[in-house]
Amino acid sequence: MSTIDAHHHVWDLSMHDQPFLDQPGLEPLRRNFLLADLEPEAAAQGVTSTVVVQTITAPEETPELLMLAATSDLVAGVVGWVNLEAPDVADAIAALRHLPGGDRLVGIRHTVLTEPDPDWLARPPVLRGLAAVADADLVYDVVAAGQQLDAAVAAAAATPQLTFVLDHLGNPDVSCGVDESWAKTFRAFAALPNTVAKFSGFLGELPPGRADLADALLRPHYEIAMAGFGPGRLMFGSDWPVSTMHVGYAGVCTAARALTADLSEADKSAIYSGTAHRIYGLTP
């Protein structure tokens, strides 16, 4: 079965900084992670296409990712960044589409995790920007956690014409069982018809050296996701290279396959390729 990795990153620290790497505990990620590093790992796991996702809220990164996609046989889509609060969102998106690789632009994301205002996504200027993303026939990736998920629900409800893709199942903490606050908001997000979720992120959040806890810690979150979205609204993503912190690329793929082992081939096909093809409009 061919697989689409619908969520990974790349960065070259010689070109520009990655401010989020300044957080304590992320020291192993403070080096370059290039597409050339990912390609052999993806090939070993049967991954035939990927979606590369922005990491910094600055205009210079997205053109670089588009150029990467234009010159790669692996990268089929780019989730980039524009300033959603700016009055010229539509013009900024149009300009990206005229760049080399602009036809690979499939979505927009803002790193809401770094915003001090938990209601950032529901601000009127941001909602106007999200409407412009919808008008451009792109999707919006949501990277949020905790109280920020409430604003994601509000934004998705207020912008029904836009598809919202929740990265990493909303970043639940899997180390100590299911957080009922997360579960409640996650289910509210899933109940909206214009929402999708990425079966990503949490797959690499096991405690170091405790792969034996994969089923106990990950399955409850996976089952909530399946109940809320079903395979037709879930897509697999590695979250590489963040996932190298604990289990690595192969470990993420192994954990995902273990959780989905009992599904039908049609349901597996949806999670591992069909949903990403449909939502992002990927060209093989």
Image (cartoon, rainbow, N blue to C red):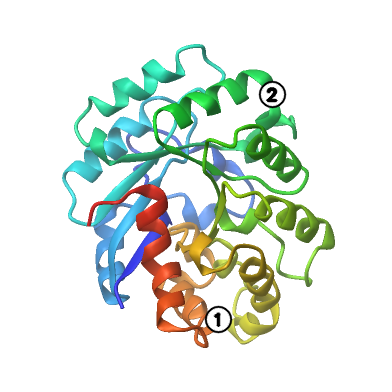
Chain-order first, disc 1 or disc 2: 2
Q: Is residue 161 left or right of residue 100?
A: right
- Residues packed near mark 2 inside 10 Å, few (<14), some (14 to 19) or many (20 plus): some
Residue visible at 32% across and 22% down in the picture: 94
Q: Nearer the viewer, residue 93 or 279?
A: 279
Q: Is residue 209 visible?
A: yes
Q: CA distance from mark 1 to mark 2?
A: 37 Å
Q: Is residue 107 above or below residue 31?
A: above
Q: Is residue 9 visible?
A: no
Residue 40: x and y in percent read: 25, 68
Q: Nearer the viewer, residue 190 or 11?
A: 190
Query: What residue is pinned by disc 2?
Result: 123
Residue receiving disc 1: 259
Amino acid type of the residue that numbered disc 1 sits on in the rendered structure:
Leu
Question: Quarter-wise, where is residue 221 in the image?
Answer: bottom right
- Residue ID at (44%, 32%): 81
Relative to 9, residue 211 above or below: below
Disc tally is 2
Residue at 41% over, 37% down: 138
Q: Position of residue 183 (x, y in %)?
A: 77, 61
| Mark 1 closeness class: few <14, some 14–19, many ≥20 residues within 10 Å | some
Residues 24 and 214: in front is 214
